[in-house]
Image: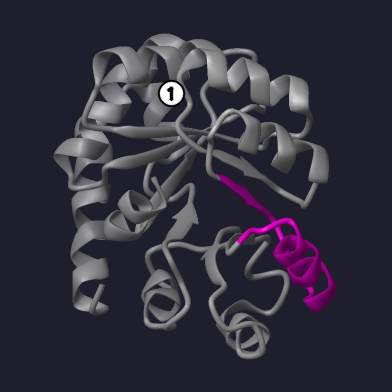
């Protein structure tokens, strides 16, 4: 799963209030060249949205984001999530994900948090919220002492600064909401989302990823 995320280089972070929009959204992203999607557990529609994508869009790698408890992880796993993302490091979530054979990507923004993640056997972490915690400069400095650790920066990233993150050698992928804006999802403008996804894929290629 992590290799597929790395190959894509992008993780659209999506908050859905209507699970019926999950499949056309996933298809629009896939048509635009983005084969990964993270559905956040910030709404009650998340499990049904994940299940719909997992069942109807086999080419899309769907994961669950903003997973805060082992119980949410269980719901996400039953729905068909292929990876788990959490905003912070929680050993119980990591252990539960491992029991299900699911890759888990917790948030970490300090050396102490990275050390704790390493003790749990993790090597891919979410740098969140990226811009608030110093952006590319902070991430580059933070990654330097931890050989073998890769990051998915997320938070405050858009089409303007994403290329700067892609150019960092230890960035597995870049996450963000700009690839599937909430207002376009609500409006059902999936052609617009496809165009944004295609533009994001072009920027990634130009950045050498």
Residue at the location (68% across, 61% down)?
129
**Residue 205 horizontal side relative to residue 45, left or right:** left
Q: Give the percent coordinates (x, y) of residue 48.
A: 49, 10
Q: Nearer the viewer, residue 45 or 156?
A: 45
Q: Nearer the viewer, residue 163 or 68?
A: 68
* Above or below: residue 7 compared with residue 18: below
Q: Is residue 116 magenta?
A: yes
Q: Quadrant of residue 95?
A: top right
Q: Give the percent coordinates (x, y) of residue 203.
A: 25, 68
Q: Nearer the viewer, residue 51 or 112?
A: 112
Q: Look at the image and tell me in which quarter the N terminus lies.
A: top left
Q: Is residue 189 visible?
A: no
Q: Give the percent coordinates (x, y) of residue 160.
A: 40, 71
Residue picked out by circle 1: 186
Classify mark 1: residues with Cα within 10 Å, few (<14), some (14-19) or many (20+).
few
Residue at the location (78% across, 71% down)?
115
Residue at the location (34% across, 55% down)?
3
Residue at the location (66% across, 58% down)?
121
Q: Look at the image and tell me in which quarter the C terminus lies.
A: bottom left
Residue range (magenta): 104-122
Q: Is residue 159 magenta?
A: no
């Amino acid at each position: 799963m992590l290799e597929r995320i790395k190959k894509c280089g992008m993780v659209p972070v999506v908050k859905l209030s209507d699970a019926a929009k999950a499949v056309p959204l996933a298809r629009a992203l896939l048509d635009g060249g983005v084969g990964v999607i993270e559905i956040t557990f910030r709404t009650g529609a998340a499990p049904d949205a994940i299940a719909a994508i997992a069942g109807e869009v086999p080419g899309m790698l769907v994961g669950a984001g903003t997973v805060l408890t082992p119980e949410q992880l269980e719901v996400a796993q039953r729905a068909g999530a292929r990876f788990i993302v959490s905003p912070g490091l929680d050993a119980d979530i990591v252990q539960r994900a491992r029991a299900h054979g699911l890759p888990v990507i917790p948030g970490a923004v300090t050396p102490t948090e990275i050390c704790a993640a390493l003790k749990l056997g993790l090597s891919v972490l979410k740098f969140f919220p990226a811009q608030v915690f110093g952006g590319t400069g902070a991430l580059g400095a933070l990654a330097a002492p931890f050989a073998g650790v890769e990051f998915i920066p997320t938070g405050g990233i858009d089409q303007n600064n994403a290329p700067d993150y892609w150019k960092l050698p230890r960035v597995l992928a870049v996450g963000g909401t700009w690839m599937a804006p909430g207002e376009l999802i609500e409006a059902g403008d999936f052609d617009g989302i496809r165009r944004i996804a295609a533009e994001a894929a072009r920027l990634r290629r130009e950045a050498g990823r």
